[in-house]
Image (cartoon, helix red, strand yellow):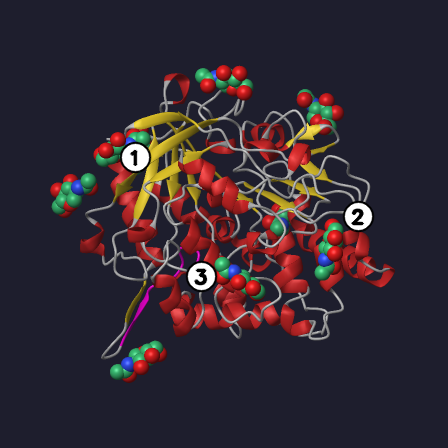
Amino acid sequence: MNIIAVTVLVILLNCGSFCICVPPQQLLVNMTVVRNATALGAFCLDGSLPAYHLHRGFGAGVRNWILQFEGGGWCNDLKSCLERANTRRGSTKYMNKLATFSGILSNNASLNPDFYNWNRVKLRYCDGASFGGDAMFKNGTSILYFRGQKIWEAIIQDLLPKGLGHARQALLSGCSAGGLSSFLHCDGLAKMLPNATVKCLSDAGFFLDEKDVSLKYTMRSFYAKLVTLQGVEKNLNKKCTNFFSKNPELCFFPQHALKFITPPFFILNAAYDVFQFNHILVPPSADLLGQWKGCKNNTAQCNEKQIDTLQGFRQNMLLALRSFSKNFSQWGMFINSCFAHCQSESQETWLAVNSPRIHDVTIAKAVGDWYFNRNGTNEIDCPFPCDTTCHNLIPTALDDRRFLSSISESDLDGCEDCLARKHKDNKSGINQPMHGLMVVGFALFLDRITFRDCYVSLIS
Ligand SMILES: *[C@@H]1O[C@H](CO)[C@@H](O)[C@H](O)[C@H]1NC(C)=O
Ligand SMILES: *[C@@H]1O[C@H](CO)[C@@H](O)[C@H](O)[C@H]1NC(C)=O
Ligand SMILES: *[C@@H]1O[C@H](CO)[C@@H](O)[C@H](O)[C@H]1NC(C)=O
Ligand SMILES: *[C@@H]1O[C@H](CO)[C@@H](O)[C@H](O)[C@H]1NC(C)=O
Ligand SMILES: *[C@@H]1O[C@H](CO)[C@@H](O)[C@H](O)[C@H]1NC(C)=O
Ligand SMILES: *[C@@H]1O[C@H](CO)[C@@H](O)[C@H](O)[C@H]1NC(C)=O
Ligand SMILES: *[C@@H]1O[C@H](CO)[C@@H](O)[C@H](O)[C@H]1NC(C)=O
Ligand SMILES: *[C@@H]1O[C@H](CO)[C@@H](O)[C@H](O)[C@H]1NC(C)=O
Ligand SMILES: *[C@@H]1O[C@H](CO)[C@@H](O)[C@H](O)[C@H]1NC(C)=O
């Protein structure tokens, strides 16, 4: 059984009064290793056992469950997967055993009014294919397990007897690569819980099938390699792969898979998602001359044409969501015009005095209204720069550095491996070519803010 501790962490950042720091009270939840995973062949990249963190629900929420996929990029070739297998992204051996539960995972009614008393689970990500693969690589010297699908199944099998099997209501969620997992496994969860109301949420997981600024489909090629290497295709939605029988790997893109998903779905995404900006719209390979460097660093440095390009990206995102939004009595969305990435896991963006809003509605309220059918939630923001509530990860004015330190909770889940992580993340910084290892986003800011100080004080 998990032992839970509320630890007081005083985090002092070096960036002065503009910082939005992590709230002082943190709920830390112990890791549960899935011992039975061996029987299912469910292993992390390096062969270690998969794991999750469970914080029990109580009161009226005791039969409700949130399952949240951890995010953290992908690996789509042997080199990047072998590297990853030696980090917390590919092995539970290197993971912190305590996870921070905040935002949508918080147990505090005033910070998470709709889900605080639910059973809340964080599924650790260690396969590198959004919990989607089922394959293996083995030669004389190296071995890699691509078993994301099996990991998903093993965790569910472990949770069913712990109460999930008797769930009344469930919400499958996740951010970034984990937000993509929500698309991949939404139907599967609904099938496994026929007597429960199952709904799904993707936070920053609506990765667009878009050309980059050099008119190449960089992301398509990236996912095609991933799907092939990790044996993902057979686990994709069958109706979708039949429909796209010539390019079944397209079903890894949420916008193509979406219309084949049955349970009600909520899409939470920033229209100018910084990960998509840096890896789909303007990957380093599409900006060899570095014309976008300034704009990526501070949107006040974007020229008119670049702003137009960003607006075009937003338009295409809204277009991809359009047919979906027509059916919004059951389905919902919150697309804010921010330079953000992942907004449900950290308290500052989920629900706080100055958290992001559209039409004065916070993300926590929008998701709750949708889940509980209180109000159709179809919130689409006006285009940049009209929204003043954003927590932008890229400054939008020359003197605006307010939110540079609002790190996603998944990046703050501990410190055991901080230095290793800093080193690894650094390797995949935005200005280096993408070569398989895509670790989401905060490498962007390592040069500019003092993460190290944050981590160091976290240890205390
Ligand atoms: C986590 O579990 C370990 C081993 O059971 C235990 O020693 C530790 O105190 C727990 N930590 C917390 C914060 O619950
Ligand atoms: C819940 O959060 C509120 C607002 O941050 C805080 O005042 C309160 O002490 C918290 N309650 C618990 C039990 O931690
Ligand atoms: C096994 O594969 C790895 C990764 O491609 C390679 O570095 C290594 O040399 C291979 N070993 C053998 C024995 O082929
Ligand atoms: C693990 O598997 C064994 C044998 O199949 C089963 O008896 C046991 O209940 C399982 N344990 C858990 C925690 O699922
Ligand atoms: C669902 O509910 C029905 C009727 O109450 C029951 O017979 C069935 O066993 C339940 N199924 C599951 C998977 O709990
Ligand atoms: C990045 O932006 C900051 C201001 O936010 C500026 O001081 C710095 O020179 C910029 N760096 C580059 C490479 O443009
Ligand atoms: C919306 O509903 C219509 C009619 O029921 C259906 O044809 C269409 O496929 C749905 N769109 C999506 C994205 O589910
Ligand atoms: C539903 O949301 C709209 C727009 O946010 C708001 O004007 C309306 O009052 C809400 N209705 C209810 C019943 O909460
Ligand atoms: C991070 O990368 C920069 C240049 O890309 C390099 O100068 C720096 O030493 C790296 N830091 C670490 C910790 O690897």
Query: Residue 131 in magenta?
Result: yes
Residue occupying image coordinates x 40% and y 43% = 415
Per the rendered image, the range of residues in magenta is 130-138
Establish if 423 lies above or below 288.
Answer: above
Disc 3 target residue: 238
Marks 2 & 3, CB-CB < 8 Å contact: no
Identify which amino acid the numbered label 2 is placed on. Answer: Leu
What is the number of the mark on residue 398? 2
Which residue occupies 53% across, 75% down? 246
Q: Amino acid at mark 3?
A: Lys
Q: Nearer the viewer, mark 2 or mark 1?
A: 2
Whether residue 314 can be seen here: no
Visible in this render: residue 43? Answer: yes
**Residue 96 magenta:** no
- Which amino acid lies under the numbered mark 1 shown in the image of this protein? Gly
* Of 143 and 334, the residue lying toward us: 143
